[in-house]
Image (spheres, rainbow, N blue to C red):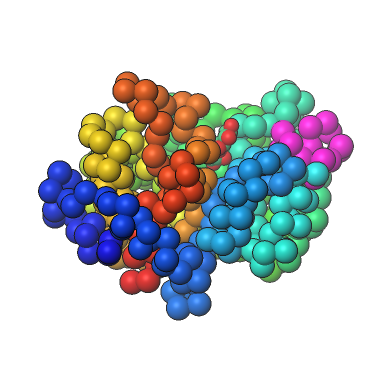
Amino acid sequence: MLNFASLALSAPALLMPPVSAECDVDLELQPPLRSLTPASGIKYGCAGGGPTVQHDRVLLDKFATEANIFVPEGALKWAFTEPQPGQFDFSEADSIADFAARHEMLIHGHTLVWYATIPEWVSQLTTAKDATAALERHITTEVQRYRGKIWAWDVVNEPIEPKDHLENGYRNSVWLRCLGINYVDLAFRLARAADPATPLSLNEYGIEYATAECQRKREATLGLLQKLRDLKTPIDCFGLQSHLQAENTFDHRGLTEFIRSVVKLGYRVMITELDVNDWKIPGTVEERDVTVARHAAEYLDIVFSVARPMSIATWGLSDRYTWMRMYFKRTDGSPLRPLPLDLNYRRKRMWSALAGAMAA
Ligand code: XIL
């Protein structure tokens, strides 16, 4: 029987007992993650495509079994929802909304304003007037359409990139170029006007580790969050994307202080895109699964030591479908294993790490 204690952080990976078929069977008998919500107050979500683009029924079944939040991995991004000015296409997003309603799931609204996955016409905007008009139409239409079905909206995604060498670590984007950093405030005000009840979040990545890069990201992100507080921008929560790298070392203090500051500013936190990249870690599949699970457990432990997140979402559910495969390849050619279920949809130790955190 695999229990959460077997992920104890102090035990070296190679001393962990091997994962046996028996322990997989035990995991399959555990109640699904979504059943832990009533006691924990934490919802579980996973990202993917809807029934119109995702034809794997087994996967969709697993979504409905494990999750009470469906995160459209692409369907709500601008390039898909408004490919031409004023011409909206909600076909995939609507199919997700139907699926979610049938399975008593909410949708995590990802995402309204991002520098990426925007159509050509948006990337070519050059004036404040045109950018404002585009944001007004887009945000109002999309947010009003899904009112009442959304768990939270990622209104602005990834506004920080110190590597762009712009003022205050702001990311270079069409929005920044046209409107300056005020685009963030504007986007949140438009979203709040279109749906006064749904939590609104700013989502960011790359803040977890003991590196100068993460340190800069933490500082710049906090700087922006502070500024938005001063402006009384209607933001309710901060989304920790949590794309983790199993070979990295957490900055316990830096991360703890970061989350503490976020909470002190009055924001709630969510874990929005958790996965653990194992492209660089050696070992057998079993050893890698242990390292991945332990890394996730260590991370969740740090976050929970400061704040209980409103929800935990993973960026995918089964290793069979992970965005990471497009960007990261292991030298031994074996498929990445960053998610809670394996290639055959069976629960892995990472699943236990999530269940353990939610049950704690
Ligand atoms: C990724 C999707 O998973 C890919 O399928 C797509 O091609 C690019 O976007 N941070 C985010 C997500 O906020 O929207 C990204 O999703 C992954 C990184």
Q: Seen from this angle, which residue lies furthest bottom?
A: 39
Q: Nearer the viewer, residue 284 or 356?
A: 284
Left or right: where 313 falls relative to 209:
right
Q: Nearer the viewer, residue 134 or 347?
A: 347
Q: Nearer the viewer, residue 23 or 197?
A: 23
Above or below, 123 against 226 in this view is above
Quarter of the image holding residue 236? bottom right
Which quarter shows the C terminus? bottom left
Q: Position of residue 202 (x, y in %)?
A: 54, 51
In this view of the protein, can residue 112 be seen by the observer? no
Q: At 47% from the left edge and 64% from the top edge, which residue is drawn?
A: 33
- Total marks drawn? 0
Q: Position of residue 321 (x, y in %)?
A: 53, 38
In this view of the protein, can residue 124 be seen by the observer? yes
Q: Position of residue 219 (x, y in %)?
A: 36, 44
The region drawn magenta spans 78-90
Q: Nearer the viewer, residue 109 or 255?
A: 109
Above or below, 313 against 304 in this view is above
Q: At 45% from the left edge and 69% from the top edge, which residue is drawn?
A: 31
Q: Position of residue 215 (x, y in %)?
A: 31, 41
Q: At 13% from the left edge and 53% from the top edge, which residue is drawn?
A: 11
Q: Is residue 83 magenta?
A: yes
Left or right: where 319 falls relative to 333:
right
Left or right: where 22 falls relative to 166:
left
Q: Is residue 151 magenta?
A: no
Q: At 71% from the left edge and 47% from the top edge, which residue is drawn?
A: 51
Above or below, 251 against 122 in this view is below
Which quarter shows the N terminus? bottom left
Looking at the magenta stretch, what is its main secondary structure? loop
Question: Where's ligand 1: which quadrant?
Answer: top right
